[in-house]
């Protein structure tokens, strides 16, 4: 069984008058079990050069169970503060990932329309890094 | 200006080449290198019904901005999850121990982040939003 661990640390000394130091660790397991996820797309990079919609993860092209515990990582590698990618799931806007930002979230992939897509804010070269961990 | 950082570490033996990825980002306001300076605070709620609830209400001042949201399911029962949706679109299930960290641009007034527990027994969830503005509701 594969062991995949994701941890997050959010820290700030001046957001509040009390120091913020939040940590969380999770082991990526199949839905409802303690068995680790066994498949991944691998760490990938995509360079866009248009403000078009790009499908990062095409639900219908992936052989994976629906309503499960898949996890997605995406990072905007741009270094220009104004450049962002808008992340959508089945057309619903999740948020804007600005330069240097990353996100990590569960994806239930509940139907064939449940694609994860990005739309870059610029038509110049913009690179993102992404990875999917999923159940078989 | 507040300085807040979020660091992700991913480690895995899922492939024959071990993965060890560490990424850090500073949380800035949209289009700037000015730090986000407002937060809901770190909240813990114990849910005791399977009702779908609005966890974070989309506000006019947040539309198109760079808010960041952290949510963690603190249950220890592997079968228990919370279903996360935005504007009724299913994002995913956070199982026991799982956490998520996402940007939230609050695309419109209907773009709430909602949560539905899978069980009606006590299920603890922690969450926090760090943002650059929220509309205040009149009394």
Image: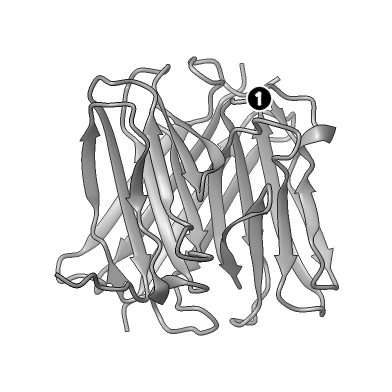
- For the point 47% across and 58% down, which residue is it? B110
Would you identify the image quadrant in which residue B49 lies?
Answer: top left
Quarter of the image where the N terminus of chain B is located? bottom left
Q: Is residue A6 left or right of residue A64?
A: left
Residue A24 visible in the displayed image: no
Q: Position of residue A40 (x, y in %)?
A: 72, 33
Instruction: Reply above or below: B101 against B133.
Output: above
Q: Position of residue B27 (x, y in %)?
A: 44, 70
Q: Which residue bears the numbered disc 1?
A: A66
> Which residue in the rendered view is the most extreme toward the front?
B139
Q: Nearer the viewer, residue A98 or A108?
A: A108
Q: Is residue A32 left or right of residue A84?
A: left
Q: Nearer the viewer, residue B23 or A136?
A: A136
Q: Position of residue A97 (x, y in %)?
A: 59, 65
Instruction: Reply above or below: B87 against A1.
Output: below
- For the point 22% across and 24% down, which residue is it? B122
- Give the chain of mark 1: A
Quarter of the image where the C terminus of chain B is located? bottom left
- For the point 76% across and 34% down, which residue is it? A112
Q: Position of residue A114 (x, y in %)?
A: 69, 40
């Amino acid at each position: 069984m594969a062991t995949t661990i994701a941890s997050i640390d959010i820290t700030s000394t001046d957001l509040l008058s009390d120091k913020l130091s939040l940590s969380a660790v999770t082991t990526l397991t199949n839905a409802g079990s303690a068995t680790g996820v066994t498949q991944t797309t691998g760490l990938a990079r995509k360079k866009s050069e248009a403000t078009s919609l790009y499908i990062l993860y095409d639900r219908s092209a992936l052989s994976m169970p629906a309503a499960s515990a898949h996890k997605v990582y995406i990072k905007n590698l741009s270094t220009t503060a104004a450049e962002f990618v808008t992340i959508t799931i089945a057309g619903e806007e999740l948020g804007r990932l600005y330069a240097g930002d990353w996100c990590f979230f569960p994806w239930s992939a509940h139907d064939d329309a449940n694609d994860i897509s990005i739309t870059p804010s610029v038509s110049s070269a913009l690179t993102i890094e992404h990875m999917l961990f999923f159940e078989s | 200006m507040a300085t807040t950082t979020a660091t992700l570490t991913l480690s895995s033996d899922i492939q024959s080449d071990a993965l060890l990825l560490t990424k850090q980002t500073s949380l800035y306001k949209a289009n700037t290198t000015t730090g986000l300076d407002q937060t809901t605070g770190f909240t813990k709620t114990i849910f005791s019904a399977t009702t779908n609830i609005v966890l974070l209400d989309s506000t006019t001042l947040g539309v198109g901005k760079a808010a960041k949201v952290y949510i963690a399911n603190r249950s220890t029962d592997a079968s228990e999850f919370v279903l996360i949706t935005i504007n009724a679109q299913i994002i995913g299930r956070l199982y026991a121990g799982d956490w998520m960290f996402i940007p939230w641009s609050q695309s419109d007034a209907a773009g709430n982040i909602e949560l539905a527990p899978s069980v009606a027994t006590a299920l603890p969830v922690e969450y926090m939003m760090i943002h650059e503005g929220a509309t205040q509701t009149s009394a």
